[in-house]
Image (cartoon, grey):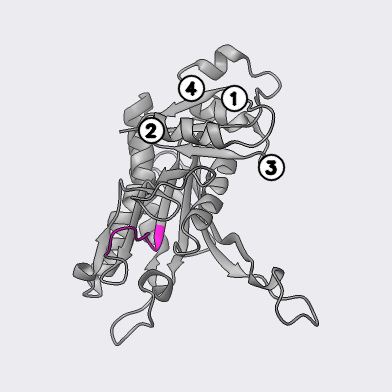
Amino acid sequence: MGSIQHQALSRTPAPGLSKEKMDSRSSAAALEEAEVDPTMKTIYFTNVDNLFLEVDCAKGDALLVQRMFEYPLSGPHEQLHSWLYNRGIYDAIRDMGLGRGWRDLTASAFSKGGPYYSSGGGGGSGEGDSSGAPMPDRDYPGSFPTIVIEGGYSRSLAQLRQKARFWFDISNHDIKIVILAKLILAQNKIILERWEERQRDPRMGATTTRRGSEWVASCHQEITISKSSISPPAYEVTSGDLVLSFRQLFLRDPRAGEGDVVIPVTELQWYAAEVWAEVRNEIGLGQGGVTGR
């Protein structure tokens, strides 16, 4: 099942990028070059009824819809998020003896107020690529995951970052971590970003202010995995291991034998090799990269 993203924003081809190229099979590279205005509202939806509800509730005199994209599931896209979740995060959770205390929420659709609640417009809804939560803390109808992973094969990094902010907002801050995994084919690299929220510090001299209660979403760790050699394939990882807070994942302090989930550099190199294997399978490349295509 694919996901469809409707954007009420202007999308114009970059210089030298024709409409025909935008419509061609190489949509991943074309979208990477497209110019997106991040200040305009993006509406995420999982079905047509939800889209119409959002359109009816849109404020203003007009709603500009320049293009709709459908992102079918692909091997590289699936590997970008599923490997991190299954072989990285869940394996570490299981190794701590907490496998039965973890709930897989992958393929669950969520809307403001919870998966089974209609927001009445304005809130939108979405489906994370991979997600999970601790039990019993989040084992009830309407509960959100504590972590969501979003893969980007066709979607741009700007779109993924916008989706990260969307997840924190729609969950009323119940989602604690959003991992973005973006494959940039033209540069032979994968960018991983770990997004979290922090409460903004109150202004000096203020006791209780609206500003003091605001939450700010931002990237707290960025890792780049570059394909540095073709034969044999080799992958260079910058910024070290991917580290996920135990307390953010499980909503409690770790006990004896428990700790932060760490995906080390060696595992990230294996992860990159698996992603590039899917790229080769999908677009028929040999061991080389895509530079110059």
Labels 1 and 2 touching (C-beta < 8 A): no
Q: Nearer the viewer, mark 3 or mark 1?
A: 1
Chain-order first, disc 4 or disc 3: 4
Indicate whether residue 108 is drawn in magenta: no
Q: Which mark is residue 47?
A: 2
Chain-order first, disc 3 or disc 2: 3
Q: Residue furthest left?
A: 100
Q: Is residue 279 left or right of residue 172?
A: left
Residue 153 percent across, percent down from the top left: 45, 36
Labels 4 and 1 touching (C-beta < 8 A): no
Q: Amino acid at mark 3?
A: Thr
Query: Badge 1: how crowded within 10 Å, few (<14), some, or many (20+)?
Result: few
Q: Nearer the viewer, mark 2 or mark 4?
A: 2
Residue 113 percent across, percent down from the top left: 42, 55
Q: Amino acid at mark 1?
A: Val
Q: Which residue is mark 1?
A: 65
Query: Badge 3: how crowded within 10 Å, few (<14), some, or many (20+)?
Result: few
Q: Amino acid at mark 4?
A: Ser
Q: CA distance from mark 4 to mark 1?
A: 22 Å
Query: Badge 4: how crowded within 10 Å, few (<14), some, or many (20+)?
Result: few
| 49 over 95 or under it: above or below | above
Q: Which secondary structure, mark 1?
A: loop
Q: Which residue is mark 3?
A: 39
Tell me, yes or no, if residue 187 can be seen here: no
Q: Which residue is mark 4?
A: 26
Q: Which mark is residue 288?
A: none
Numbered range of the magenta stretch: 140-147
Tell me, yes or no, if residue 59 can be seen here: yes
Chain-order first, disc 3 or disc 1: 3
Q: Which secondary structure, mark 4?
A: loop
Q: CA distance from mark 1 to mark 2?
A: 17 Å
